[in-house]
Image (tube, grey):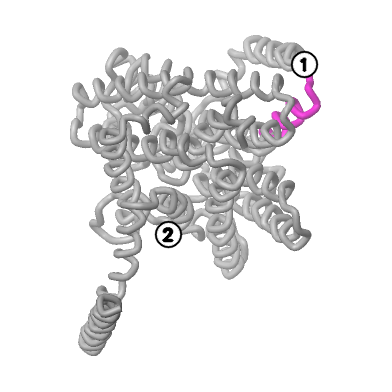
Amino acid sequence: MLSFLLKKEVGLIAITLFALINGILIFNEIYLQLLLPVLILITYWFIFRLDFIFLLIVFCTPLSFNFENLFAGGIGFYFPTEPLLLGFSLIFILKLILNKKLKDRIYHLRHPLTVFIILHFCWMFITSISSELPLVSFKYLLARTWFICPIYFYGSLYFKQGILSIKQFLTAFTIPMFLVTCYTLLNHMLHGFSEEAGHWVMWPFFKDHTSYGAILAMTIPISFWLYRNQKYMYAKLFYLFVIVTFLIGLYFSYTRAAWLTMFGGFLVYVLYYFKIKIKWLLSLSIIALIMILINFNEIGYLLNKNDAEHTTENFSERLESMSNVSTDASNLERLNRWNSAIQLFKERPILGWGPGTYAFVYAPFQDASDLTIISTNFGDGGNAHSEYLGPLSEQGILGLIFIIGIVFTFFYYSGKFYINSNHKQTKGITLMIIVSLATYFAHGILNNYLDTDKASILVWGLMSLFICISNVSLVKKN
């Protein structure tokens, strides 16, 4: 009893001192100490509840912002996700070293998809050594490490807890993304929903409208699955409202690539859900390819220089302009980036220029005939606008092979599992994952965002989720 009283007194003294110090600091207009309870709680979670940190990272991802864009001369990292990911990676790796049995519980280590991911990571390390800008490449490699390690590998331990953990993960991303979409739409409304404002109203949560549209397209299948798997009517109505909000947000993102990939995702859904034979799809693809080859010379003739930037806000006109390479500056600039990536590859076909270096080295490789009104000679205009040509130019031919291997392996095994599975719930989750990632990797032909936290958390998280639910013994257990 005496020891209890002593402990209680110590606690009261500590609280009193903390309140007193807080009062003095606030009086002097110093407020950083107010974060101390939050830091103590997060430290406790890091030590004892990594699952809480995992969900915290996912929740913070749509709300994160880049310090480099927020402050002049700021450090280029996403806050608060990247500091949390770095700490998570260190703690998780330490636990793997100290607890050898923990490694055996990670199903991912035995999956072919993991083999491609590890091979790609090793090749990125090699090309970072030979990089034109080693510091840039190793920083890029480090960022890729803390994207994959906590989300992809720890996900094996987290998702095995069952359907509740899956819902928690998906909800933790969807709700803040819904808040960001509401903020963007309200901000956009104040500017009359104009296309010009539509390029920046999502700031500071997204750098531009293209990344915002890509993540919205990925999140819509997730929100649809959450809607389908709610027991209560009020929850269903809420997620129905979320879906409608996302669709409105996607429309006013003025992102043509996201519109088309969303439509492509819907076709993938129809293909799998109604079990349309793949041979019919292949036949249509072959016919389309033959038509392109027949008209190849005419298409090449149309790829001429253009000085007019796209400005129309009409939905049908924007979709039409996406295929009109002769009158749309954004399309021509994308061709400029692709041609630059190919020229970079030709210069260094084996090792490439180094991970993350494209933006710094592509400018001298631009052809004068490819330049548009939105081109830059300073190499400050962004990346290769392709999830496939980017690795080709930065990591050589093997970089492209590994990224294609990751994409092909995922869709091969996920499609095979969906077709062969008799478990209704896991089929539904698998189809949601396939459609969501189909929108991203189709979008990846035109843009690349795997170097950002928002795309990486979803891509690696959904891949991790698929591998967990595809484990037969795990499905039976849960």
Q: Which SS does the magenta portion mostly show?
A: helix
Q: Is residue 224 above or below residue 300?
A: below
At 67% from the left edge and 33% from the top edge, which residue is drawn? 426
Q: Is residue 222 visible?
A: yes
Classify the position of the N terminus by image quarter.
bottom left
Towards the viewer: 360 or 125: 125
Q: Is residue 277 above or below residue 193?
A: above
Q: Where residue 324 appears, x then y in whole percent?
A: 61, 32
Q: Which mark is residue 443?
A: none
Q: Which mark is first along the chain, 2 or 1?
A: 2
Q: Which mark is residue 204?
A: 2
Give yes or no for residue 233 being in the magenta stretch: no
Q: Where residue 32 appears, x then y in whole percent?
A: 26, 73
At 63% from the left edge and 44% from the top edge, which residue is drawn? 222
What residue span does the magenta drawing correspond to? 264-276
User: Which amino acid type is marked by label 2?
Assistant: Pro
User: Which amino acid type is marked by label 1?
Assistant: Lys
Could you say which quadrant of the image residue 379 lies in? top left
Q: Residues within 10 Å of mark 2 (few under 14, many from 20)?
A: some
| Cα–Cα span, label 1 and label 2 | 44 Å
Image-based side of 52 in relation to 210, left or right? left
At 31% from the left edge and 56% from the top edge, which residue is drawn? 67
Q: Where residue 250 appears, x then y in whole percent?
A: 63, 50
Q: Which residue is mark 1?
A: 277
Q: Residues within 10 Å of mark 1 (few under 14, many from 20)?
A: few
Q: Is residue 207 visible?
A: no
At 41% from the left edge and 30% from the top edge, which residue is drawn? 337
Could you say which quadrant of the image residue 269 lies in? top right
